[in-house]
Image (cartoon, rainbow, N blue to C red):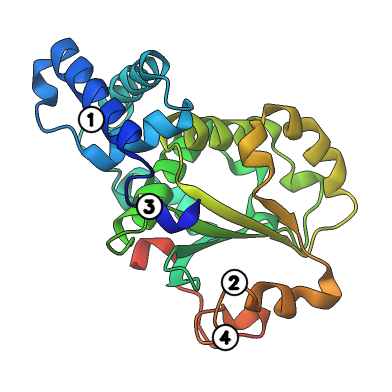
Amino acid sequence: MDEVEGSWRSEDEKKLVGLLRLSVERDDFTSKESDISTLRRFLRARDLNVEKALEMYQKYTKWRTAEVPNGFISSSEIPNELAQKKLFSQGFDKKGHPIGVILGGRHLYSKRDINEFRRLCVFGLDKLASRMPDGREKFTIIADIEGWRYSNCDIRAYRASLEIMQNYYPERLYKVFLVNVPFLFTKAWKAIYPFIDKNTKKKFIFVDDKKMKETMLRDIEENQLPNIYGGKHPLVPVEDT
């Protein structure tokens, strides 16, 4: 399916996106310039059901207007989150998807403000989306759980990030590599797993520590793989991309 992520899968899909666009424009006259690729992603996320896709898109536009009134999140709005140096964005996988890296062991529950954390999620997701080349609509994530302890456990934040990604950035996630996963993290994973939709669950890959580089090199060239995993690409803080 990935080979057509940025193009039409069928004539029926094209017609349904046209119907969705008409519904969006009829509902909101400010949406005359509705982006076709965005509407297509929302339609695919709802299995080509125009009514459900419209409902999802309407919720997205209301959320975006309320939570991102300026059209983007600036680094000045998330100083405490950026100071933890836990989110990076650089390189591309073999299919041209931009790569994001999350260092979960640097997230501290005691220093987290949930609203600022939500803004960080939007900031990071928008950065990844802005780096997508033509024909690509998805990104790849490396979620590094090294050093994760109870002080890093934050189920509310994990659920918030899932909610934002699944509800407002549909069909954006290509794959998540979970690396350096300590046994302790499995308890947190069991708590958040029920909140991951069935299609997204398939995209999470727990990587064997002994085969980490080997596994990721199947999807990422060595010159694009972060150097902390044996590649040649330095980590770049998300705010610098």
Q: Which residue corresponds to the image point at 79% horizontal and 31% vertical from the top-left?
A: 191
Measuring from the top left, give residue 74's x and y in whole percent. 28, 48
For label 1, count other residues whose C-alpha is less than 10 Å away and answer few (under 14), some (14-19) or many (20+). Answer: few
Q: What residue type is labelled 1?
A: Pro
Element carrying mark 1: loop
**Mark 3 lies on residue:** 137
Label 1 vs label 3, nearer the camera: 3
Residue 193 horizontal side relative to residue 227, left or right: right
Mark 1 or mark 3: name the one nearer the start of the chain: 1
Q: Distance between the residues labelled 3 and 2?
A: 16 Å
**Mark 2 lies on residue:** 219
Measuring from the top left, give residue 95's x and y in whole percent. 46, 68
For label 2, count other residues whose C-alpha is less than 10 Å away and answer few (under 14), some (14-19) or many (20+). Answer: some
Q: What residue type is labelled 2?
A: Asp
Callout 1 touching callout 3 (CB < 8 Å): no
Q: Distance between the residues labelled 1 and 4?
A: 39 Å
Question: Closest to the observer: 125 or 7?
Answer: 7
Q: Which residue corresponds to the image point at 38% horizontal and 31% vertical from the top-left?
A: 42
Mark 4 or mark 3: name the one nearer the start of the chain: 3
**Mark 1 lies on residue:** 69
Q: How far apart are marks 4 and 3 (CA)?
A: 22 Å
Element carrying mark 3: loop
